[in-house]
Image (cartoon, rainbow, N blue to C red):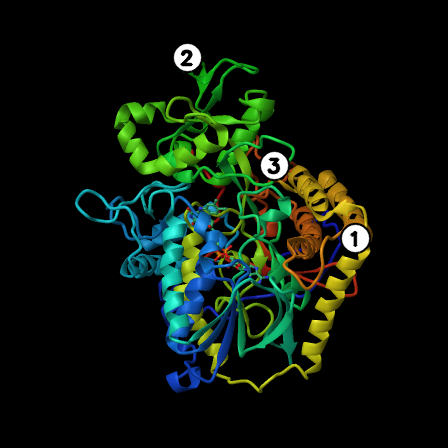
């Protein structure tokens, strides 16, 4: 067990028993573990499946694929989402692609290489067993999607095309122009619709899960609110699957869909699910820079653009000349210079920090000097405009529409922005949380990405979880079902409904002077300043103090408009911001306690002389799984030690 690191801020939390994943069969070699787990896990026969109900919260790539697959398997599925259609889940926005170790390019790829790249890319803070399984399953996803008719890009000869993403030296990313998420989501959605039509999946559109119902220690249902009528309802099942996506919007400004939030996982956390590595946030290097105080959303420029786009800033500080007037020898292609082996395709955490450093040195471009160039001049010259347009046309159009600049004629300006959260609810190898019967998949779990996710790996993980992993592992749990019937007369259900009712009434009754959005904006700015790209002991302590103040003010001075029994987005937002405030505090505590740098978590106190993240493996090679304490005594830290049998711990290098 890891020893106590010196300087742990034990005034803010306490340390509990260690936690371990006991489900992966570590007595066989890593390449056999997934197969062995499926063999050892108990099954549920088709006749019994029909007797069991599974609630799936979320219809993005993870939840949509899981609900469709479980429906197809014969379970009764209840599927919940808060948008009008499953097709509007945030997954629809994914642009660049999905990884798979198919080795179609014959460029040296393999399951082992994808496994290795992912463990290294995550800065050695993920579980080997899970990552290996992910790499194995990746190849099945592509077959599944192609069978569904997902129109992946093809080469002239008709084979599926590939491109490269950050942190790899092979081309393993399958894509559908800049709309890969949309096409994959439509594939999952069609499978889901088929199951809805077959009567296996019952749909609850515009319905938001607001609490988890636990009976006799097992997750047995949810409390949900109809977002159109405001009505509360309860739903019961033999198991609950949460696939509610990531929580990047805690920063207010992010590339996530505006609706993405933490409510489902946060409320499950408050019911006993441990929250793992909440501070691991991904800052994506290629986003359109912030351009105004009242902006509410940031736009990603896909990482795929770094296949051909070259990142640079002027060599001289304060050079305000037009980009095209700066001669070649006066430009600093800083990624190519600093990381010659990977060049512009270094992982996101590294590219983001390098861009920030260039801007901090006064060499940033555009308003406020918060931007670097992503330049396609060389690619257009080499490949021709038509070829560049064919690969990236929709992304270029998006850029032109938002900025009013023509990226074919002048370089794009980009800056890092919050994009993805590697943290999430802790799950074991079976994807089961610390609450028996509650499974967590997709971005909502703490995932397989360690401290930094490689590009095109989120879609891979979400679909691996939904199509392949969960449907196999949940049977071990359900083999003990069906569980005794639960209904509204159960005290646990009544207590959960009462809690939700009280909270909504309280939010509507405060009638203070500040809007919900103003609290969210203030919280987001604070998180960006102190728990964003660079974190310090002093800054994090300041942030925790201020978050407590924001929380206090929110509950005494927020003004929630409208009424309960109607379509009321202000009320929805208020509930989500209340949860973001609590989550933000845990994120800062996690960031403060992790007195090392790793991946996207960069502690200024822990860096190499070259300014790279400096890990402390002796003290921090663990997953931090946090337990909520209802009595307000601060969270409890449970550590899961990470053991590396197949990939050796090393200082990450992309040089
Ligand atoms: C702009 C952008 C581009 C990206 N491009 C790529 C890419 O090219 N490749 C890649 O691998 N990854 C990419 N990602 C990351 C990837 O898109 C996400 O990680 C992934 O889609 C998350 O899928 P999910 O199914 O876990 O969650 P989501 O797609 O976010 O779905 C969440 C679902 O949960 C539902 N939900 C949430 N809370 C509740 C609640 N309380 N009650 C009821 N329902 C609820 C929502 O309605 C929704 O259906 C990108 C991300 C962004 C922001």
User: Are there few (<14), some (14-19), or many (20+) residues within 10 Å of tag 3?
Assistant: few
Residue 576 in sight in this render: yes
Q: In this view, does 154 lie to the left or right of 402?
A: left
Nearer-N-terminus badge (3/2): 3
Which residue, given by chain and number where applicable, does mark 3 sit on? 295
Q: Residue at x 51, y 85 (%)?
A: 482
Task: Work out whether 404 lies above or below 2.
Answer: above
Residue at disc 1, secondary structure = loop
| Quadrant location of the N terminus in the rendered image | bottom right
Residue at disc 2, secondary structure = loop
Q: CB of mark 1 within 8 Å of CB of mark 2?
A: no
Task: Work out whether 410 lies above or below 283.
Answer: above
How far apart are the two marked residues, 3 and 1, measured between alpha carbons? Answer: 37 Å
Q: Is residue 435 left or right of residue 107?
A: right
How far apart are the two marked residues, 3 and 2, measured between alpha carbons? Answer: 34 Å
Tag shown at residue 327? 2
How far apart are the two marked residues, 1 and 2, measured between alpha carbons? Answer: 55 Å
Q: Which residue is drawn at 54% across and 22% down?
A: 366
Tag shown at residue 11? 1
Residue at disc 3, secondary structure = loop
């Amino acid at each position: 067990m890891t020893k106590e690191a010196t300087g742990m801020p034990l005034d803010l939390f306490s340390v509990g028993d260690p936690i371990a994943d006991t489900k992966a069969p570590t007595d066989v070699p890593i390449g056999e573990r997934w197969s062995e787990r499926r063999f050892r896990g108990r099954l549920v026969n088709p006749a019994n499946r029909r007797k069991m109900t599974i609630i799936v919260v979320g219809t993005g790539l993870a939840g949509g694929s899981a609900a469709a697959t479980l429906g197809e398997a014969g379970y009764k599925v209840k599927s919940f989402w808060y948008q009008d259609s499953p097709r509007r889940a945030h997954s629809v926005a994914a642009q660049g692609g999905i990884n798979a170790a198919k080795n179609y390019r014959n460029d040296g790829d393999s399951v082992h290489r994808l496994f290795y790249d992912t463990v290294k890319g995550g800065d050695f803070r993920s579980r080997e067993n899970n990552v290996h399984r992910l790499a194995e399953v990746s190849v099945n996803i592509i077959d599944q999607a192609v069978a569904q008719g997902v129109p992946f890009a093809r080469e002239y000869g008709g084979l599926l095309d590939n491109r490269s993403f950050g942190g790899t030296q092979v081309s393993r990313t399958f894509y559908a122009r800049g709309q890969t998420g949309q096409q994959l989501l439509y594939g999952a959605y069609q499978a889901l619709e088929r199951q809805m039509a077959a009567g296996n999946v019952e749909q609850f559109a515009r319905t938001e899960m607001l609490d988890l119902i636990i009976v006799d220690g097992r997750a047995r249902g949810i409390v949900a609110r109809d977002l159109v009528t405001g009505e509360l309802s309860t739903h019961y099942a033999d198991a609950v699957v949460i696939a509610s996506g990531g929580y990047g919007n805690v920063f207010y400004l992010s590339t996530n869909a505006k609706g993405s939030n933490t409510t489902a996982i946060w409320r499950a956390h408050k019911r006993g699910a441990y929250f793992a590595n909440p501070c691991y946030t991904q800052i994506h290097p290629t986003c359109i820079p912030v351009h105004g105080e009242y902006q509410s959303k940031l736009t990603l420029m896909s990482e795929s653009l770094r296949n051909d786009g070259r990142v640079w800033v002027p060599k001289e500080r304060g050079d305000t000349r037009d980009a095209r007037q700066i001669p070649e020898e006066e430009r600093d292609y800083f990624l190519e210079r600093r990381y010659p082996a990977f060049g512009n395709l270094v992982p996101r955490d590294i590219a983001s920090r390098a861009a920030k450093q260039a801007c901090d040195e006064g060499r940033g471009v555009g308003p406020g000097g918060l931007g670097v160039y992503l330049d396609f001049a060389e690619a257009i010259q080499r490949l021709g405009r038509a070829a560049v347009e064919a690969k990236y046309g929709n992304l270029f159009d998006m850029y032109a529409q938002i900025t009013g600049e023509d990226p074919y004629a002048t370089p794009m300006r980009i800056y890092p922005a919050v994009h993805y959260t590697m943290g999430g609810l802790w799950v074991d190898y079976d994807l089961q949380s610390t609450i028996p019967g509650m499974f967590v998949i997709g971005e909502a779990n703490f995932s397989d990405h360690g401290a930094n996710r490689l590009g095109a790996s989120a879609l891979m993980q979400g679909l691996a979880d939904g199509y392949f992993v969960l449907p196999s592992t949940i049977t071990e749990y359900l083999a003990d079902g069906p569980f005794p019937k639960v209904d509204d007369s159960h005290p646990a259900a009544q207590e959960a409904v009462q809690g939700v009712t009280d909270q909504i009434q309280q939010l509507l009754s405060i009638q203070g002077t500040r809007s919900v959005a103003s609290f969210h904006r203030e919280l987001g700015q604070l998180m960006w300043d102190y728990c964003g790209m660079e974190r310090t002991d002093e800054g994090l302590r300041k942030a925790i103090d201020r978050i407590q103040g924001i929380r206090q003010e929110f509950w005494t001075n927020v003004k929630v408009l409208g009424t309960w029994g109607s379509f009321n987005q202000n009320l929805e937002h208020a509930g989500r911001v209340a949860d973001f405030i609590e989550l933000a505090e845990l994120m800062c505590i996690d960031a403060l306690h992790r007195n090392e740098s790793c991946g996207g978590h960069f502690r200024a106190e822990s860096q190499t002389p070259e300014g790279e993240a400096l890990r402390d493996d002796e003290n921090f090679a663990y997953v931090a799984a946090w337990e909520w304490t209802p009595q307000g005594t601060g969270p409890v830290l449970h550590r899961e030690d990470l053991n590396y049998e197949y990939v050796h711990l090393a200082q990450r290098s992309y040089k």
